[in-house]
Image (cartoon, coloured by chain):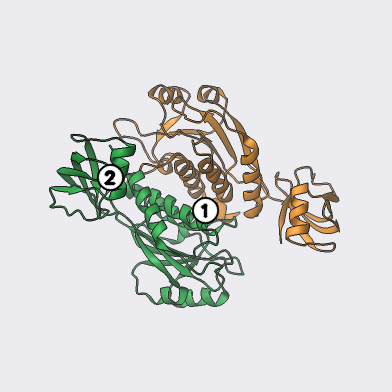
Chain colours: A green, B orange
Amino acid sequence: MHLFYQPALSPTDTSGTLTDDDARHATRTLRLGPGEAIAVTNGRGNRFLSVITKADNKQCAFRVETVDTVAPRPFSVRICVAPTKNLDRVEWFVEKAVELGIERISFFFGQHSERRVLKLERIEKIAVAAMKQSLQAWLPQLDEAVPLAQLLKQPADGQRFIAHLPEDGQAPHLFSAAGPAQQYIVLIGPEGDFSAQEVQQAIDAGFQLVTLGPNRLRTETAALSACQSLNLLNVVNLVNL
Amino acid sequence: MHLFYQPALSPTDTSGTLTDDDARHATRTLRLGPGEAIAVTNGRGNRFLSVITKADNKQCAFRVETVDTVAPRPFSVRICVAPTKNLDRVEWFVEKAVELGIERISFFFGQHSERRVLKLERIEKIAVAAMKQSLQAWLPQLDEAVPLAQLLKQPADGQRFIAHLPEDGQAPHLFSAAGPAQQYIVLIGPEGDFSAQEVQQAIDAGFQLVTLGPNRLRTETAALSACQSLNLLNVVNLVNL
């Protein structure tokens, strides 16, 4: 069954209409019509098993038959990443992280960031598409890019990590440093890495230095690797869901 | 220091020349000249710390100062994947898997594969670029695409897995099913998944059914996730290298 996204739906709703984009996809591309079953999520944990009641080029209305509630994962992964110079790379990270499982993606500009502007609109669309593609009911939170210093001042619970290899080369792997079933925040630097000052500011703000393995990784690869390390650390919980 | 790739180098060589592509990159893009230090790998575990002796637009010659030998990892990951309809996706997988660490990538055509042709030339270039980018000294082996039945007949040591969720939904996660420090082979199906017959053929050939988590993953995401699960399973060994 196809999964659509309608953020306006509440768990008590008994009917609804798809967004323009989804209506077009349902009626024109998939050629779905009245009487056919669809699933719709509001991106906040609810899945509405529904039946199409009206379908034309402009609108697709449905009647809700049953509502499922999907619990949030018993841990949460937040990756804070400096946008890459080439936007494809950060967009790719968002698609893959959403497919594999992530709760929140925050962007920041570091001292060595080449990119100084990031529009979220396209990235939000990619996140929605990846949520639907992977049949999930939770849309991760996406945060507008802010300077790193501002990000470090935000209050946040959980285990905090910064992916950076210190000059003496001594730091544990994220996978060894993190404990299971936590709220995690990981900072991933830009192509030019963090400055020494930024690393110190992060340490002062309670972030622990970690590595992501022996190879030098691109920004987006490091970000996805961090996300996947934390997902796998909790894999026993995940499989038991 | 920049890392270049010259497959013709042997550990006993005391001098060499870069390939045309690398020579152009070294002399034109990076503007390196005589006396400057470079590193060169042959993709077979040797790293040649060298000094440029001659550099013009067409040729870049170097003198080898010291040769390092990098041991292979104490485990090996081979991912066998059906090429995606959209070539970008399989190319992306190759880039990321090489960055994160992989020994061998094999391609196959399944009954539900939409793509029936795969040229390795471009994929080999991507693998070489990712090896250099991530500062590694081993180039993974890439195998030409063959029909799945032919792949299943190849003799191979190690633990064998097929990423497929059976109808009853019962299969362990790859991360739980695999043991550390092994040779691993994982089969990842095309967009249309494996046929029931193919799954049975794989089981008959000694492959174990595993899942990669609760979300439905695209082919290239599943392939990378499998690779990274096996890498992380061995992370303690990796960090100690």
Q: Are marks 2 and 1 on the same chain?
A: no
In the picture of the structure, the residue carrying the numbered disc 2 is A23
Residue A140: name its quadrant. Answer: bottom left
Please say if A199 is above or below A90.
below
Residue under mark 1: which chain is it in?
B
Please say if B34 is above or below A28.
below
**Which residue type does callout 2 highlight?**
Ala
**Which residue type does callout 1 highlight?**
Val
Please say if A51 is above or below A158.
above
- Secondary structure under tag 2 reads helix
Which quadrant is home to the N terminus of chain A?
top left
Q: Residue furthest front?
A: A57
Q: Is residue A115 left or right of residue B6?
A: left
Residue at horizontal 24 percent and vertical 49 percent from the top: A70
* x and y, in percent, of residue A137 in the image: 28, 50
* x and y, in percent, of residue A22 in the image: 30, 46
- Secondary structure under tag 1 reads helix
Residue at horizontal 60 percent and vertical 57 percent from the top: A216
* x and y, in percent, of residue A189 in the image: 52, 66
Residue B236 image label: 1
